[in-house]
Amino acid sequence: MEIDIQEIEQFVDLAEKFSQKSILPMFEGEFSDGNLELLPGIYDTAFDIGFASSPDMSLAGSEYGIWGSEIDSSGILSSILTLLKISEVCGGVAMGLNSQGVATNLMLQAKKELPFATAKVALCFQEGFSLPWCGTILSPNEDLPARISTSARSAENGYIINGSKSFVYSMGDVDAYVLLARVEDKWGCFIIPSDDDGLTGKDVGQRTGMRACRVNHLEFNDVFVPEDARIDDGDAMSFAIRAMCLNWIGITAIAAGIAKGAVASARTYIADRYQGGGQIEDHPAIKRLVADSEARAYAAKAAVLSLKDIDLSFAKNSLARDLKLCAMAKLTGLDLCAMAVTDCLQTFGGYGYMEDFGMEKRLRDVTTLKSAFGAPNYLRQLIFDLGKEI
């Protein structure tokens, strides 16, 4: 797969300008997570300039936005680098763009016309505090997706859906949900309008971090969807695998960007602060904290960039390997990033825990990402169950 380096550099440059001009002003004033009332405008700008992908082909990002349709031919590097750059300023905005992108990508994969128009979407996958186990994912005919309680049963001219989904991340109000559910002994993928009478959503309430995203729990009560709202061809297992891998890659990229932003802030702070007649950056303990943090942020970035050539078709002979690689990147990358942010915060002393410098926000955000879309214990179990060494 050939990569146009000049084109990639343009994406990164545009992402930096978007971050500085559109996102950074959100943090002017006394807000622990920025002025969240500005988010709709920020996300609208992301759609206008093409960072936010959408199944609406009239919008700029449907092809080249984060996880847009072109990733199958041009690769995922531009999406990774865009998330890395944006999350240096705000991990929550990057998470919103990633969530929109993963849901959009599943819809674009289907290459089907829907019975209704939709632009803003969100993925409904997780139930409770975990994701499907290894057998359910890789051999559903042996280990049925019965552990996925949300089910779709056949009805006249369509399906009736019942169940619940947890921790549905989105950019805010959405037009539709991309739902992965059980259809007898297989996976099914459905598009459900967000205003359906049988669908109820509830905000999860006060959260540790990632507050620039909306996070809902959803209930589906006898929701009817027509046949053409099912977008898979009879088995959506490949959609489930793609959703998991893209989310893990995206979350790791976001965490690495947060860690890099933390290192930059720490370096700026220690260069301006004096104690005992000298700059605190000259203190050996401070140097050690920043050096360790920079090395860890770099290692996390390297881990996610190592996945840039992953085969998104997830051919049967490489499926377990690719799934394992993505799970390992999230497991190790998030640990590295959490340690990097923690050490950077320590360079601020007690000020690191105050809202003024934004370090406590970075710590809250990266801590939330560790459990988002697969907590560490789930990833460890999955990595072990996927078999022998790579």
Image: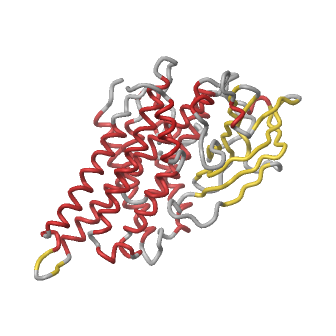
Residue nearer the viewer, 51 or 251 = 251
Query: Where is the C terminus found, in terms of image quarters?
Result: top left
Outermost residue on the right side: it is 156
Does residue 41 appear left or right of residue 337 in this picture? right
Which quarter of the picture shows residue 235?
top right
Q: What residue is at 37 percent from the left and 67 percent from the top?
A: 359
Does residue 106 appear left or right of residue 250 in this picture? right
Q: What residue is at 38 percent from the left and 76 percent from the top?
A: 356
Residue nearer the viewer, 275 or 87 = 275
Does residue 158 appear left or right of residue 367 in this picture? right
Q: In x, y percent, where is residue 251?
A: 46, 47
Q: What residue is at 51 percent from the left and 49 percent from the top?
A: 97
Outermost residue on the top side: it is 317
Looking at the image, is 190 positioned above or below residue 314? below
Q: In x, y percent, where is residue 222?
A: 84, 43
Looking at the image, is 212 positioned above or below residue 303? below
Q: What residue is at 14 percent from the left and 70 percent from the top?
A: 283
Q: In x, y percent, where is residue 282?
A: 12, 69
Colour scheme shown: secondary structure
Does residue 176 show up?
A: yes
Looking at the image, is 352 positioned above or below residue 386? below
Count of all numbered marks drawn on residues in the image: 0
Residue nearer the viewer, 126 or 46 = 126
Outermost residue on the bottom side: it is 276
Query: Where is the N terminus found, in terms of image quarters?
Result: top left
Which quarter of the picture shows residue 57?
top right
Does residue 119 show up?
A: no
Does residue 265 appear left or right of residue 111 in this picture? left
Q: In x, y percent, where is residue 34?
A: 47, 69
Residue nearer the viewer, 203 or 340 = 340
